[in-house]
Amino acid sequence: MVHETNSSRDRSRRAFIGAVGAAGLGLAASTSIAASSDGDPTPIDSPTVIEEPGEYELVADLAPDRLEQPGCILVDLRDEQGRSSVHGDFTLYGNGHTVDLSGTELDFEDPWRRATGIAFDPRERWGGALESSWDATVEDIEIRGANTGISSWRASFGTYTDVTVAENDTGFYFYIDGSDLIDCVIEENQTGVNLYGDTEVWGGSQSTFENCTIRSNDRAGIVTGPESNARIRSSRIIGNGDGVVSFTEGPGTVIEESHICYNDGYGVYGLAWPGSEEYPEDDRPIQASVQATNNYWGSDNGPLSLERRRNEQDSGYEYVQPDEPFTDRETGRSADGDGDAISESLESGVSNVRFDPFSEAPFDDVGAQR
């Protein structure tokens, strides 16, 4: 589902309201606002709680000194039983503004001691069966210095266009259902995107990435959880700790026509876990696989094979090349190139990443161009 961006609309009005400046900066208290009835988006210039669908727009940069709520912009369209209380959509036009929580202190107990930039349907209000019947659209906004840039516990869908999340613990966190990310930049976070995916609650987190740049995140650029997957196309996954880490059983993640380059550990890592007596709940083999054909791996001769082994000296991991490179499960081609690394499956010598065929040269105009 792709929504047309309106981030360039109404430039004269944007210039006028941008002069409002720091009207809401430094406030501990939040404001509850209702959707406008005059057809124009409702302006937001301070930490805000939104409990009605409609169109809203950010009219100033937000950098509060203190917050009394878990999200600087908290969108909660449910009743006290945790069910959707409305039928309608929510849209936030960021107008190029920034939400910066890097210097924000919290007036509530939180183990992370950092708030979320935009929080949808926060977990604390779950009181019954979770039902949602609304979609979210967010565009043209930057979020920095938060525990999570954008966090969603909704059983519904969202579209995020021209969004930048940077220098957060986690850039995006989708717990139940995922969203479309279009022309987004996810950079310099601890973890770029976490798709947790809890089927016990709903159906697992499913997200698509189109023309996104996922770069320089300390750990993984994208993590897919036990019941989640990702569809990644025409994107750049570069310079992360690991590019994509998949814990999804079966072929849940697809990457195509993208750059997977210069990641420190693996370009793509698919979990291969045989289980152990130490963890009886994991006593069955777990095999995650990733479909990652027609990508550029940073070299004209394709990806590299790499084993991750426990380092007994410091209980960490070390990465070593195997004696023989892993092969593509379908074509038998060896991953013996100089590009980013792929992982081994439970079948010795066979990768759990489908990489063949691969592109020998970079693609043009891949990823968000900023």
Image (cartoon, rainbow, N blue to C red):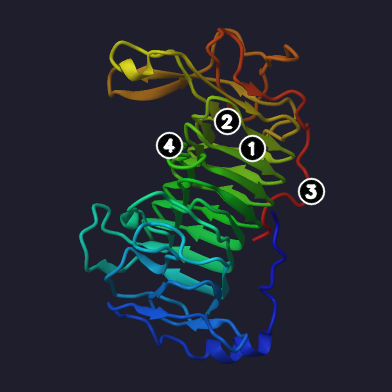
Q: Which mark is residue 364?
A: 3
User: For mark 1, does the 10 Å Cα neighbourhood hold few (<14), some (14 to 19), or many (20 or more) residues?
Assistant: many
Count of numbered badges drawn on the protein: 4
Taking the spot 58% from the left edge, 26% from the top edge, the residue there is 341
- Which amino acid lies under the numbered mark 2 shown in the image of this protein? Val
Up-down relation of residue 309 to residue 81 (above or below):
above
Of pointers 3 and 4, the one earlier in the residue sequence: 4
Q: Amino acid at mark 3?
A: Asp
Q: Secondary structure at mark 2?
A: strand
Local packing at callout 4 (Cα closer than 10 Å; few below 14, some 14-19, many 20+) is few
> Of discs 2 and 1, which sits in the foreground?
2
Nearest to the observer: residue 53 or residue 62: 53
Question: Which amino acid type is shown beneath numbered disc 4?
Answer: Glu
Residue 155 appears left or right of 340: left
The reply to whether residue 135 is visible in this rendering is: yes
**How many angstroms separate mark 1 from mark 4 (CA)?**
32 Å
Work out whether mark 3 precedes mark 2 in sequence or the reverse, and give the earlier one. Answer: 2
Mark 3–mark 2 distance (CA, rounded to whole Å): 22 Å
Q: What residue did someone put label 2 on?
A: 268
User: Which residue corresponds to mark 4?
Assistant: 200
